[in-house]
Amino acid sequence: MTRRLPSLNALRAFEAAGRLGRMTLAADELNVTHSAVSRQIQHLEEVLGVPLFEGPKNRLRLTEGGMTLLGGLTGAFDQMDLSVRAVADTEDGQLDVSCPGTFTMRWLIPRLYRFQAKYPNIEVRLSASSKPVDFSRDGFDVAIRVGSAPWPSGADVISLFPEQTGAVLAPSLFAASTPEFEGLPQLHTRTRLRAWGDWLARSERSVATGPRVEYEHFYFMLEAASAGLGVCVAPWPYVSDDIRFGRLMAPYGFLESGHEYVALRRARRNRKSVLFSEWLQNEAEVYVRASTPPTRAIPGKVRSGFPSGIA
């Protein structure tokens, strides 16, 4: 069967403009001029015999035909991208990595310069997500996740380190508080609503916190805790620097949550993802040796049964 398709460049120009909503953005993505995108789309409309955009130049919108074509093209280009990635095996080019946003900010990015120095020809592109991984659908090469088995099928699982969590709050709030966090706002994040319940069950503690406050993102919650707006339960990698520099404290230390951090990699490996996974595993080993979370409070002055520091 002979396929009779318009120019691939014209299809790419239209798909980018339709997906991004503006020809200038499409030109930036494709690294061409605005006029080049416009000419390609005009050529495509002439070949197809239908208009793909309508409206004034500064507020173009897709026609019905344009919407139909865009729906098919976006999926097709995504599939082509996955197919190319499946066979590419080089030590240069893009490597797409997905990981939770706060982990990216607090743990990965501060270390990433070492990978870039070692492999300057690999461009690591980070995207924030904690969603379940499906490599048959998702376009990234490596995903860092925290959780427990079973992990997704079709993925190599590289263990990084177990997770420890603890209740943390600002020193100023601790100094003014009563035992067992009595009356303090209990901070939560929508991305991990069971954090408090899991920590209380594992620590076998009883607290008398005050009103419940929810934040959309983990890093919002951590900033609120640092600002003295309440007490939250957080993983050690997210708060180790805050505790070291005195922005937060963990009166009851940290304990294992039953989860672990892992790197998930496509079962069909490519050189870039293998190098990145090996680097991640080495960084994790160094981190575990150098940064042991406190497991309990320092013995010392106790105010109304509330320990005064951390180990």
Image (spheres, rainbow, N blue to C red):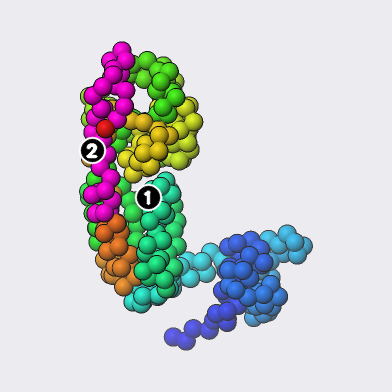
Q: Is residue 292 magenta?
A: yes
Q: Quadrant of residue 65?
A: bottom right
* The N terminus: image quadrant: bottom left
Q: Look at the picture and state if 44 lies above or below 22.
A: below
Q: Residue at x 37, y 15 (%)?
A: 178
- Of residues 244 and 130, the one nearer the viewer is 244
* Residue corresponding to mark 2: 256
Name the residue at the bottom extreme.
2
* Residue corresponding to mark 1: 107
Is 142 displayed left or right of 13 in the figure? left
* The C terminus: image quadrant: top left
The location of residue 190, given as percent across then percent down, is 43, 36
Q: Earlier in the sequence, mark 1 or mark 2?
A: 1
Q: Residue at x 41, y 27 (%)?
A: 171
Tag 1: residue type? Trp
Look at the image and give the residue range highlighted in magenta. Answer: 284-310
SS class, disc 1: helix
